[in-house]
Image: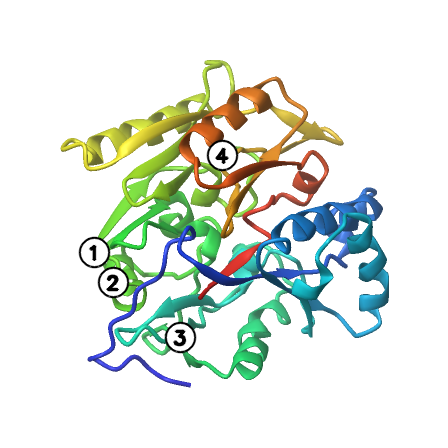
Amino acid sequence: MLSKHKDDVYRMPAEWEKQKSTWVAWPHNKKDWPNKFDLIPSVFAEIISKICKFQKVNILIENKKVKKEIYPLLKSFLANTENISYKVCKTDRVWVRDSFPIFVKNRLNQKILIDWGFNAWAKYKNFNLDNKICIKINNLLNLKSVKPKKNNRRIILEGGSIDVNGKGLLMTTRECLQSLIQERNPGITKKQYEKIFNQFLGIKKVLWLNKGIVGDDTHGHVDDIARFVNERKIFIACEKNKSDANYNILKENYKILKKYNKKNIFKIVKIPMPSPKYIDNIRVPASYLNFYIANKIVLVPIFNDDKDIVVLKIFKKHFKKRTVIPIDCSLLIWGLGAIHCMTQQEPS
């Protein structure tokens, strides 16, 4: 395990850069979708089938027996199973965006694994298996890995809490990284985070938004509210209904972003929120921003909502070189995550 050498320069590639593969974990934790789990594997199969038409998909499974259950489901969605690889790696949950290592490149363009600590968003007690995923991936891929530490403590960081443009810009929220609620890294200041991002992800400037959306159990993940879609373009979630709990939160984030953008460095595109979604009287964090960019496609969550069509039009306008594919996430979101949360890209 390496500590960072002073001459190493790392860069986290943007999601739209050429990918070697996508990593996902097969769902098994029934507690994550109370009373609805049986419907979830087919949603995963649909998402995997769309991606594996164009690139390799690595599926983390609990044991080899699970392959026999998955295969017919993938075939029913006409998946290109030649592009699918199964890796035995036990997990607590499926949200590999947060539990998986982050791939960066060094100045020689070699891939390195950044092995952040994971503590289940400082909210849940069962994260022991998820916190060991990097060791398994490291053994599988035989890449160098780096464990960021501060004062001899491992730094906790989830992939869903940050978004990058691959050219030195990163977005995150104060709520996620600076709040005393669900505190990931006690005592680490904004300036220290900026230094950490610079050191391990090659970030020159951090755009600190304020808060995440209502119903988000991560306490402020940015991948539900604002995303880079190219080096100079940002999609940001907006709510028009003044009586909605997200109205002021998202208005504030938009204001902050506008302030950062005084010199019009990037284009800001507003993405409407779906109407509030409730399952078993619990508001879930439904957002169109939890999309995933793969090599030739963009998978966009939809929610059987009037805004679905409007949003898909916006995506098609701004992703002319990729096919925009809607995925019904009305049930998936009961696990409090969507497409971006369940995927992790490996750059080529």
Of the numbered discs 1 and 4, the one sitting upstream in the chain is: 1
Residues under labels 3 and 2: Cα distance?
A: 15 Å
Residue 211 placed where, x, y %?
40, 37
Residue at image coords 26%, 58%: 203
Of the numbered discs 2 and 4, the one sitting upstream in the chain is: 2
Marks 3, 2: nearer the viewer: 3
Which amino acid type corresponds to the residue marked 3 in the rendered image?
Ile
Would you call the spot at circle 4 few (<14 residues within 10 Å), some (14-19), or many (20 or more)? many
Of the numbered discs 1 and 2, the one sitting upstream in the chain is: 2
Which amino acid type corresponds to the residue marked 4 in the rendered image?
Ile
Q: Are marks 2 and 4 in contact (CB under 8 Å)?
A: no
Name the residue beneath numbered marker 2. 198
Q: How many marks?
A: 4
Name the residue beneath numbered marker 4. 213
Q: Are marks 1 and 2 in contact (CB under 8 Å)?
A: yes
Which amino acid type corresponds to the residue marked 2 in the rendered image?
Asn
Would you call the spot at circle 1 few (<14 residues within 10 Å), some (14-19), or many (20 or more)? some
- Residue 82 appears in the picture as rendered: yes
Would you call the spot at circle 2 few (<14 residues within 10 Å), some (14-19), or many (20 or more)? many
Name the residue beneath numbered marker 3. 112
Q: Are marks 1 and 4 in contact (CB under 8 Å)?
A: no
In this rendering, the answer to whether 340 lies above or below 257 is below
Mark drawn on residue 245: none
Left or right, residue 189 beside residue 315? left
Residue at image coords 44%, 66%: 348
Residues under labels 2 and 4: Cα distance?
A: 27 Å
Q: Which quadrant holds residue 1?
A: bottom left
Of the numbered discs 3 and 2, the one sitting upstream in the chain is: 3
Residues under labels 1 and 2: Cα distance?
A: 6 Å
